[in-house]
Structure formats: structure tokens, C-alpha cells
Image: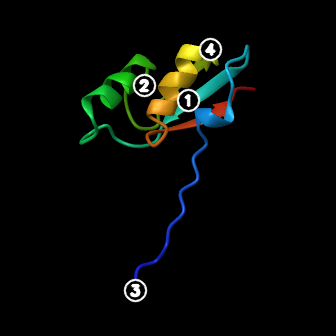
Amino acid sequence: MRMATTVQYSTAKDFKPSEAKLEITQIRSVIGVKPNHRETVRSLGLKRIGHTVVREADAVTVGMLNTVKHLVKVEEAK
């Protein structure tokens, strides 16, 4: 019997481009992911699991976060 799992993402889809600041944390490894996802994580400024950066929620950043939502955790900066 297979158990159903639900994954809840705290991703950029919850955010719209705005003047808000976002705290972006890498939560999963980029080993074995598509090369363009790996490059996107690096473009966000993330270097390793647990690394956090603060970026503005502009259209470019929100688009990148939508691409790698399974690798990062996004929170609104305080």
C-alpha cells in the first residue's frame, strides 16, 4: 500500500512582483537536477543547502523562484 504524501511549497507563486524583500533559502541539493535549474539557483546567489539570501520581489526574481520552487524556501523578509 502506497501512502499519499502532500508537499506544500512556500514559493514565489504566493508572491507577486512588488517592493517587498524576500528571504530565499536553499533547502535541497542541486545534484541531479536539470542544468538550467542548477544555474538558476546559482543566479539567485545561493551556494549551498541552508544558505539564505535577501532579494527584492521583482519580476525576474519571482520568475526564477517559480522555476526552482522545489529547491528553495521563500519567506517575506522582516
* Of callouts 3 and 1, the N-terminal one: 3
Q: Residues within 10 Å of mark 4 (few under 14, many from 20)?
A: some
Q: Earlier in the sequence, mark 2 or mark 4?
A: 2
Q: What is the CA distance from the residue labelled 4 to the residue labelled 1?
A: 13 Å
Looking at the rendered structure, the kind of residue marked 4 is Asp
Give the SS element for disc 2: loop
Count neighbours of disc 2 (C-alpha within 10 A) and say few if under 14, some if 14 to 19, many if 20 or more. Answer: some
Asked if disc 3 and disc 1 are in contact, CB closer than 8 Å, the reply is no
Instruction: Please name the amino acid that badge 1 sits on.
Output: Ile
* Circle 2/circle 3 CB separation < 8 Å: no
Residue at left offset 60%, top offset 32%: 12
Kindly report the distance in space between the C-alpha atoms of the residues bearing marks 1 and 2: 8 Å
Q: Please say if 7 is above or below 21.
A: below
**On the image, numbered disc 4 is attached to which residue?**
58
Above or below residue 42? Residue 49 is below
Q: Which residue was labeled with disc 3?
A: 1
* Label 4 residue SS: loop
**Residue identified by numbered label 2:** 46
- Give the spatial CA distance, label 3 vs label 1: 36 Å
Position of the N terminus by quadrant: bottom left
Residue 8, position as x, y percentages in the image? 58, 53
Q: Position of residue 21 (x, y in %)?
A: 68, 19
- Who is closer to the viewer here, 25 or 63? 63
- Give, as a three-letter code, the residue at label 2: Leu
Q: In terms of secondary structure, where does tag 3 sit?
A: loop
Residue found at x 48% / y 24%: 64
Horizontally, is 40 left or right of 25 in the view?
left
Disc 1: which residue:
24
